[in-house]
Amino acid sequence: VSANPHVRDKASTHSIMLDVIIALLPATLFGFWNFGVKAIINTVICVAVCVLAEYVWQRCMHQKITIKDCSAALTGLLLALNLPPEVPFWIPVIGGLFAIIVVKQLFGGLGQNFMNPALGARCFLLISFAGIMTNFSYNGFGGSFDATTSATPLAALKAGEVVNLKAMFLGNTAGTIGETSALLLLVGGVYLIAKKIISWRIPVCYIVTLGLFVLLFGGHGFDMAYLAEQLCGGGLMLGAFFMATDYVTSPITPKGQIVFGILLGILTGIFRLFGGSAEGVSYAIIFCNLLVPLIERVTT
C-alpha cells in the first residue's frame, strides 16, 4: 500500500466499464439496425465467449473471478463492433478467446495487458483470415445499398471514387458493425468526456493530428470535403474515443496523453495514405500501446 495521501473516488472498475458500454450503445444499436440479425448474433457470441473464457481461465487458475467488473463484456463488445457483420460465427469465437486468454490473461489479467485486447484480437483475425475480415457485403434491415458491395467508403476514397459524406457521417454505409456512424460514436465520446471517464486529450489530439496530416500529405490540398470524409470514415471515431483511451494501455500523464494522441494521428495518416490498406487505426493504436512506458518516462 502506498503512503498517504490517497485519492478517494466513487468510481470503480465496474462503473467505468458500464459507462463505456452505455456510451457504445447508440452505435451498437444502429449497427444492429443497419446490418441485421447476423450482426446481433455475432455480437452476442463475442460478449458471451469473452465472459466465459475469463471465467473458465480464472476458475482453472484458482484466481479471483472478476467477470462482474464488466471488463470482459466490454472487450467482447468492442471486438464485435470491429468485425464485419457477415463473418462466420466461428470468427468471434476465435477472436474472443485470443483477446481474453492470449492478450489479457496470459499477461496477468486486467491492468497487466500491454495492448488493447479487442484490437489485438482484431489484428490477429485480420492477419489470419484477411479475406473474411475484409468482406463488408451485407443484407441489413436498414441498408439501402446492394448486398454485393464489398468496399468500405474509406477504401473507395483511397481508390479515387466518389463517396457519400452524409451517409458516412450518419452511418448507412458498409463497414464493421460499430464503426459506420461517426455521429453516434461522437455522441458516445462526448458522454464519456462529460462523465470524466476519459480525458479529451487523446481523442482530440488524435483527430486533429490526423486532420492536419491529411491536409498536408493527402494530395488533395485543403479540400475540406476530403478531410471530412477521412475523419468520418473507417474506425477513427471508434478507436479515438473508445480504444485509444483504454486506461491500461494509454499514458496517465497529461503531456503523455498529448504525445500519444499526436503519434496516433501521424501513424494512422501514414498507414492510410501511404500503406496498402485504406485503414490504419487498429495497427496505429497497438503500435503506440507498446510505446506507452517510454512516453510516460519522458513526460513524467
Image (tube, rainbow, N blue to C red):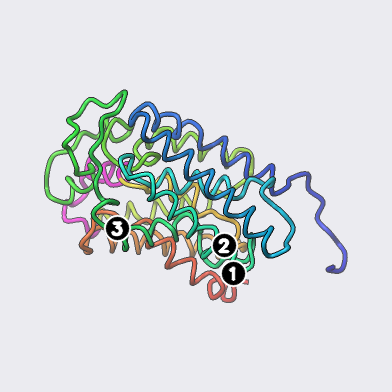
- Between 67 and 154, the one lying in front of the other is 67
For the record, the magenta segment spans 216-233
Rounded to the nearest whole Å, what is the CA distance between mark 2 and mark 1? 6 Å
For label 3, count other residues whose C-alpha is less than 10 Å away and answer few (under 14), some (14-19) or many (20+): few
Q: Secondary structure at mark 2?
A: helix
Residue 210 left/right relative to 53: left
Q: Which residue is mark 1?
A: 107
User: Residue 217: x percent and y percent?
Assistant: 22, 60
Residue at the location (66% across, 49% down)?
A: 67
Residue 198 left/right relative to 4: left
- Between 89 and 242, the one lying in front of the other is 89
The answer to which image quadrant residue 87 occupies is: top left
The answer to which image quadrant residue 138 occupies is: top left
- Between 176 and 290, the one lying in front of the other is 176
Mark 1: which amino acid?
Answer: Phe
User: Residue 204: x percent and y percent?
Assistant: 46, 50
Q: Secondary structure at mark 1?
A: helix
Rounded to the nearest whole Å, what is the CA distance between mark 1 and mark 3? 25 Å
Is 42 rendered above or below residue 262? above
Whichever of callouts 1 and 3 sits on the residue coming sooner in the sequence is 1
Mark 2 vs 1: CB contact within 8 A? yes
User: Residue 151: x percent and y percent?
Assistant: 19, 44
In the rendered image, residue 6 lying in the magenta stretch gets the answer no
The answer to which image quadrant residue 246 occupies is: bottom right
Q: Which residue is mark 3?
A: 129
Mark 3: which amino acid?
Answer: Phe
Q: Which residue is mark 2?
A: 104
Residue 74 left/right relative to 83: right
Residue 221 left/right relative to 175: left
In the rendered image, residue 220 lying in the magenta stretch gets the answer yes
